[in-house]
Amino acid sequence: MSEKEKEIKCVVWDLDNTIWDGVLVEHDDVRLKPGVKEVIETLDARGILHSIASKNNYDDALAKLKEFGLDEYFLYPEINWNAKSAGLGNIKKNINIGMDAILFIDDQPFELDEVKSVHPEVTVIDAAGYLNLPAYPRCNPRFITDDSVKRRLMYQDDIKRNQEQGDFKGPEEEFLAGLDMRFIISMCREEDLKRAEELTVRTNQLNATGRTYDYDELNAFRLSAKHKLLVCELTDKYGSYGKIGLALIEITPEAWHLKLLLMSCRVMARGVGSVLLSYILQEAQKDGKKLLADFRHTGKNRQMFVTYKFSNFKEVSSDDNGNVLFENDFSMIQPFPHYIDIKLP
Amino acid sequence: MELNEKIRKFIEANLVVFEDEAEFNDGDNIFEMGFVNSLFAMKLVNYIEQEIGVAVANDDLDIGNFSSVNRIVQYIENKK
């Protein structure tokens, strides 16, 4: 099993004397640091997100960023007078990634220390090093897929969706039905492999075994007659979420053995996590075989454990390393929710 | 508020039900009434752990303990 690289998923920037020279509340004519826009754009194109933790007046700071043509790059900016550690906490929650995937850049050692004292897993660097970011190994994801290039845009779509959902007054089902969601399950094709590999490396919370697979391993499974490699895509009226789920099933004479199941956390709130599992249950039952599933406790994937248990999987065996073998007897297969249009392979 | 009330209110607020006008009693099976997805499941477990203050062990994550308001309340009372 390969060690997951702790790639940086989000860079959180301070503003005064970090992104720009000067202190905004003191002088309005702050100057963008040379090359900082290019650094932000370069990382953005790699699928790395950006946010802000700055002690400033929110409206003024955003207006200034807009002036510099940078405002669109920052998700969930924390611009207020609270401790930056609190801001980092909010950003982590809003984007829904691990603290250890966040890099915080600030010109003040005090701020770097304050954040580090509350969130020791955050990587902190001095503002003076901003030009080194593109070359920093952890800011160089192993692969860049179509989905990674559009990552920020997809997050921005989510913010729009959540806002609409917050404004919506009716029952949640009506709101969800109004989204025109479409969940497409398909056999993994060659062009999906890069994204599939990326999913195994990036997905933590909704990954049943925490295992990562590389392109060649996945390709071998894709071509194998004894395996089914499924990918899922979710779309709604705002656009596509991209390929957000992966399942690897080994077919043996007696069983369908689910070796890998993962879903991107971004679609967690849409409640589609169980759709793939329901589909697999239905198909295994139709094939007249048992359904077994591998699970390994990784310390981050309790939600996936809960998903299996609540989908009526029972433990067959387990060991001291957190490995679990599950079996499902098909006595309780949840039907697909009516508000999602499901397209099967 | 009674524990039954609390749990029922939580479920009503968070479970997406299949029938829009569904009436649901404390004995009704929520897995049959609504779409118990991973998000709802996690929210429910978190609610029990954080708001009610009862730790839910992995071994307890049996559907049988959570399939209705009554069962959830039973589970919690047994743990307290």
Image (cartoon, grey):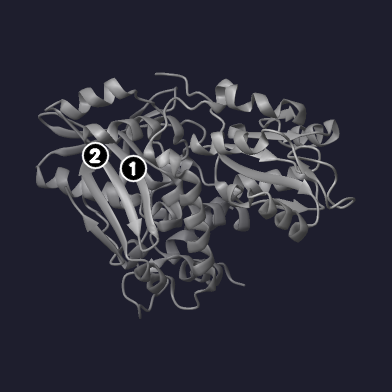
Q: Residue at x 43, y 61 (%)?
A: B71
Disc 1 secondary structure class: strand
Q: Residue at x 69, y 29 (%)?
A: A130
The residue that mark 2 highlights is: A230
Mark 1 closeness class: few <14, some 14–19, many ≥20 residues within 10 Å: many
Mark 2 closeness class: few <14, some 14–19, many ≥20 residues within 10 Å: many
Residue A235 shown left or right of residue B3 in the figure: left
Indicate the amino acid at tag 2.
Answer: Leu
Q: Subunit of mark 1?
A: A
The residue that mark 1 highlights is: A245
Disc 2 secondary structure class: strand
Spatial distance from mark 1 to mark 2, Cα to Cα?
Answer: 8 Å
Q: Does residue A125 sit above or below A153 in this rendering? A: above
Label 1 with label 2: CB-CB less than 8 Å? yes
Q: Where on the picture, by quarter, is residue A175?
A: bottom left
Indicate the amino acid at tag 1.
Answer: Gly
Location of residue A294 in the rendering, given as x and y in whole percent from the top left corner: 32, 31
